Amino acid sequence: MMLLSLLLIPLVGAAVLGGWRGLAKPCANKLAMTVAAVPLALVLLMGMHGKLPDGGVMAEWKSAWMPDVGISLSFAVDGTSWLFLLLTTVVVLFSLATSHRIGLGGRTYAALVLVLESALFGVFTARHFIPWFLCWELTLIPSYLLVRLWGGPAAPRAALRFFLMTLGGSVFMLIGFLALQLAAETMDFGKLADFAAKGELAGMMSAKFGGLGYGGPALLGAVAVCVFLGLAVKLPVVPFHAWLPAAYAEAPSPVTMLLTGLLSKMAVYGMLRILLPVFPEVLPALAPAMMALAVATVLLGAVAALAQTDIKRIMAYSSVNHLGYCAMAVIAAAAVKGDPQAHAAAVSGTILQAFNHGIIASVLFYFIALMESRTDGARSLTDFGGLRSKAPVFTGLMGLAIFASLGLPGLSGFVGEFLMFSGVFPLVPWAAAVSTIGLLLTAVFLLRMVRVVFNGPLNPSRADWPDLTTGERLLVAPMIILIVLPGLWPQLLLHCCNADTARLLESLHILP
Amino acid sequence: MFSENPTVLWLVPMLPLLAGAVIAFMPNRMGKPASWLALGALGVSCVIALLALLAALHPGGHGEVFRSVTQSTWFHFGSVEMKWGLVLDPLSAGMGAMVTFVAFWIFLYSTGYMAEEARFGRFFGFLSLFSGAMLMVVYANSLLLLFMAWELVGLASYLLIGFYYSKPSAAAASQKAFITTRVGDMAFFLGMIWLYGKTGTLSFYDGGNGLLESGALTTLAGATTIGGFTVSAMASLLLLVGAMGKSGQVPLHTWLPDAMEGPTPVSALIHAATMVAAGVFLVARTHPIFMQSGLQGLPLTATAWIGGITALYAACVALGQNDIKRILAYSTVSQLGFMMVALGTGGVPAAMFHLIAHAFFKALLFLSAGSVIHGCHDEQDIRKMGGLRKAMPKTFVTYAVGMMALAGFPFVFSGFWSKEAVLHSAMGWPGGYGPFALAVCAALLTAFYMTRQALLVFFGKPREPGVHHPHESPPVILVPLYVLAAGAVLLSLVGTPVWPWFEEWLLGAHAHFDGGALFKPHALVLVGISLTIVTVGVTASWLVYRYPSGDSRAPDPIERKFGGLWAFLGTGMGFDAFYEKHIISNVARLGRAVDTAERMFFVPLMALAEGVIKLCGRWTGTVDEQSLNRGFNTICAEMKNRAGTASASQSGRPQAYLRAIGLGTAVLLVMYFLISAR
């Protein structure tokens, strides 16, 4: 029941907001924040009462929706899901608070954000393809409208591209799962993974579609490629990334927070929880090509960021780069068998990276939102200069987030990157070796930004630049704690997902 | 307290780190309390480090090295455990005591030197972070913890070099330092994960299962990889590149002279106790892995040659500098090269002895130079100084001690003996005399350029008396100078061939006094060489610079004869220009090219995909009944055939259900039409 209320509360809140005509903007924002605080409390409660460390299911809700065809509404939370739920609740609340602070928001806006939150909960908990896919698609509508209606001048075009590209990817994913349904007669992720673990899925495919003249592995491989395509557009993986910079830059910063912090994590979650367990039979064969794309993502993101002058585009490419590491680690875990330590490192690192990147990117876009609201939308590198002398606390805290983003040990970004790389290196050495160039370039473009924006002589037009107000400090303080604490004490996050990781590896026959 | 499970050792790095964290929350007006906090925390650290050193003086018995380890689990992933911990052995004990001791006097000096600074407290916060991180590097018993602390050292140096961040040159120098060292760090990172992947551990010593213990070392030496090299050789080379970045070895040295943009105490700290010493320390710590390929193996040969080349290169460049701090900066690069030569030729004790001795006299030289700069009202050009020994007699004395130690004046200065230990190691190397010859030439030039600097700064007549009114510095600046000067002399007691206590201790043996050691032919030859080097270097320099021109704008005597060479040396042999022209600009060009590719290729590609999707949408709209429904009908028919269990009366419903499956697409397509119809 807890899970059901988690899924429904934001929807109810959205309905109330949508129906309450004449509700003033600040009140609507406050109401939305109150509503969004409830899921956070529920998730924390779930964590306290649940069985986090033993990896059991902490909460579930099931309803036989269409029993004839075996379609059920099946949702469940385990440790890994719980981390993604926690991330969702935290980032949504933070994004709403940021919107409120910079004067954005209102009834419709807040309602859309809450609908999005609900859909994200569904994505991170669904155990059956149909509810999962419905939620996956449902996220698209509110995020499209949020970008389009509240974004910058070029937002309509950027939003449409974002919408169509993700939609295009989804169609492939749908086709892939329909084929699986026909072959395996189920779309339940757990059952599919069981078939896959026994190595039966390819046989089923060939039994069903053998008439097409292809063998089972080829057919299953085609399905895996379809599913990968759907996820790759969302993550995004090169060459399906071109929608991203414009969408991230044109969206209002609190919405960009949701896009990079949460929507991209849906793809990471999908790779980890669906692609990896359902397609172990064919992934090793597909991995080299996928790995090439992942490494290209890492490098392209970092190199393209070097040439940007718009701070939001820098951060957009930085996101491409950071999520490229996740893709690389998952694909490496799928590519080769037989090194339990490396697989555990790659999978654990991916989960950590997804969580930490969500938090760090949100904090960075928080500061960008403040910069925009203080300057009427300026966000070019050359619009600033020497802000540090006027705003030491602003500089210090944004600097902390920047260093977390470039993977400074002691802050949350490092442990995930270390684990991913130490997992990938023994499995696919060249990928890890080449991707370290990405780690280096991240430092180059981020420190260049620090130098141009915060250091150097003060830009005369920013002579009255205010430092963070007390309210702004209090708002970001919990997020800063979420950056520092997991960096020093990664066990805090890892103990939530260790049992899941071990079970996943066991099902992949990687662990003895 | 230290012999088993020395948990208390954590205090040594943690106290300065915590002090730094607390200072971060203190407002600028609380500068004084911040400096006391930093000084107090480091003082306590220093006491503990010295106690630990005392404990570590006892050998472990049976000629084994004293070693005591504290370990705990940092985190688990999957079912794998990651440990971290600290180790106390002669290497870390000696290094840790040096770092805390030298840093303490630099801190004290800073309370006087930086007194006028508005961000006084902030400065001490950064200094604390710097020292704490370095101490973590020193005591770490895990390559991972060492790497983490190593990166924090990088962060602290970034903050301190860029302390005057409003100056564009300081902002650029700090960025350059961070990124150049990060090039090395990435190699270090790769080496680390390689070692981890092969051995499954990153702890150095872990009751026989550690990385530096026989089991893992055998695994590493036994595994071959690309090009037929062993994993130990490849990983060692990667670690060496990391050390080259941090320790300013050619060609990753260019950040170090620019790091002078930081306040002078920072330069002293970077060049003596922290940062650059970290690279040498890393190689010393992981030396057993290097040794797996043998004394003439690739990793050690590379170390020795890179060290030798760096030593000579930087000594040449130091000759052509006029900024008092840049001369010292290049001399640091050169001395680090000496340490690498020692490491590469198998002489870990010699390298560590030179590192520690160098820390004392280089800190002394930088702080004395700071006193000179302070006294000359922030003038750093040695051509404009002159005759300062009369105005600043105390600074002159301490400076002279440091200078003589660096130049290798015989017998009573630690620099003489430590350099001799390095040369001794290089001379006995079976891999050839190359590094030895390079080091000898570098030592000769060292004596030459240090004498030049001393003559121009302290002797002769003041060349710009109208501009400068030099004055002696206050006691808070002078006392640290006296202490470090005493150290620069007294350290020579523990490292002479007569009683090589330090080297023997590092190797876990008892030193015996052997008065005859000095008179063995081998030793005699070396002492002879050392004496010749310093005599020739100093005399030559004295002949050239004894009567400096009274005009501060007059060209240097060498410049008059060899103008082109002089300019070449002045620019550091053009490394910066080379990097600017061939690497930095190309990386920027690559960035722009990719950005263009984004616009000219990927965005059109996306537009194409977009067009296809739109087209599909339109097509679906008109031929929906024929295509989409028929598709569904086929699937439904399949469903019916298969689902014999489902009752016939329900046979119509799956079709409706499957329509629901298409809901995601359908809803979105409708939305698309709404949008495109506008």
Image: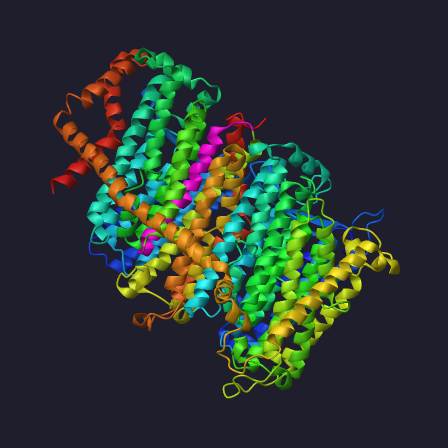
Residue A298 placement: quadrant:
top left
The answer to whether residue B417 is above or below residue B482 is above
Instruction: Name the spot of residue B358 as percent of width and height, x first.
Output: 67, 63
- For image coordinates 43% across by 50% down, the residue present is A442
Q: Quadrant of the N terminus of chain A?
A: top left
**Nearest the camera: A344 or B639?**
A344
- Do we see residue B108 in this rendering? no
Instruction: Name the spot of residue B617 as percent of width and height, x first.
Output: 17, 31
Instruction: Name the spot of residue A33 as percent of width and height, x first.
Output: 34, 54
The answer to whether residue B211 is above or below residue A312 is above
Instruction: Name the spot of residue A440 as percent of width and height, x first.
Output: 46, 49
Please give the count of numbered marks on the rendered protein: 0
Judge from the rendering whether residue A284 lies leftward or rightward of residue B413; answer left or right.
left
**Nearest the camera: A70 or B467?**
B467
- For image coordinates 65% across by 75% down, the residue present is B399
Q: Quadrant of the C terminus of chain A?
A: top right
Q: Main secondary structure of the magenta part?
A: helix
The chosen color scheme is rainbow
Which portion, as a residue range, is magenta? A309-338
- For image coordinates 54% across by 82% down, the residue present is B376
- Do we see residue B120 in this rendering? yes
Judge from the rendering whether residue A421 lies leftward or rightward of residue A227; answer left or right.
right
